[in-house]
Amino acid sequence: MTTQKAMEDGSPYKVTVLKEGYSYLDDGGQFRADGTITLVQGRHVILVDTGGPQDKDTLLQQLAFHGLNPQDVQYVVCTHGHVDHVGNLNLFPDATHIVSFDICKGDVYTDHPFKQGAAYTIDEQVSVIPTPGHTGADVSLVVRTETQGTVVVAGDLFEKEADQTDPSLWQDVSENPSQQAEGRKRVLAMADFIVPGHGAMFKVQKETEPS
């Protein structure tokens, strides 16, 4: 489906992980990491995080597999400014870029009060919310879908699903663990699925009320 057709018929949103990120210590004790790349399709075409520079060919191939060219991407949201999340921004010169708390299209910048906790609305189904902690200016994309419920593409607010039982996985790389803990709690309360910064999408296990 072309971008124009998606805009005309108001297609419901779908979230697809194009490349799962990873983070681990290799056998030589070196830390290796690459960010998850996520495609959001519906009324708008949105890419969340662009991977590292080494992901260029993979990203272009994955977009083509979904019938898209870089010119079809209307928004590129980078959850924070680390290299493994922003390595291919230059592939999308025509898009609106939201990188941490910065919003720009070309050389035109838009001021937005992310620092005061305000969400940036793309449309009634999609918004960008501030979720600082990992860095001082992290953001997450919130998408309301028909088949997946509410999906939050959270960047390194969540490293991977396992960090819920092993907090060291996210706390050891956090600039502000207490602030990040609050953001994690808020996102867990709103989300049905979370796309973390360095792993597969996972379903949020909601606590059930005792009968």
Image (cartoon, helix red, strand yellow):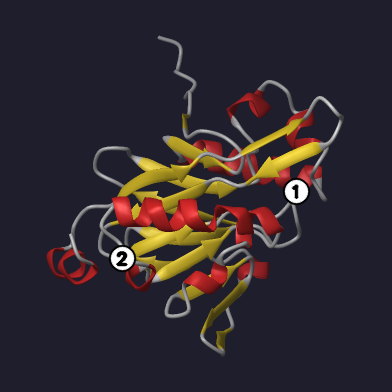
| Residue type beneath disc 1 | Gln
| Lower position in the chain sequence, tag 2 or tag 1 | 2
Whether residue 170 is visible here, answered yes or no, is yes
Quadrant that contains the C terminus: top left
| Residue type beneath disc 2 | His
Disc 2 designates what residue? 44
Residue 2, horizontal then vertical, whole percent: 20, 65
48 left or right of 42 in image: right
> Which one is in front in this view, the residue at disc 2 or the one at disc 1?
2
- Identify whether 53 is placed above or below 23: below
98 left or right of 146 in image: right
Residue 192, horizontal then vertical, whole percent: 41, 35
Judge the density around disc 2: few (<14), some (14-19), many (≥20) Cα neighbours within 10 Å: many
Residue 49, horizontal then vertical, whole percent: 54, 56
Question: Residue 179: which numbered mark, if any?
Answer: 1
Element under disc 2: loop
Judge the density around disc 1: few (<14), some (14-19), many (≥20) Cα neighbours within 10 Å: some
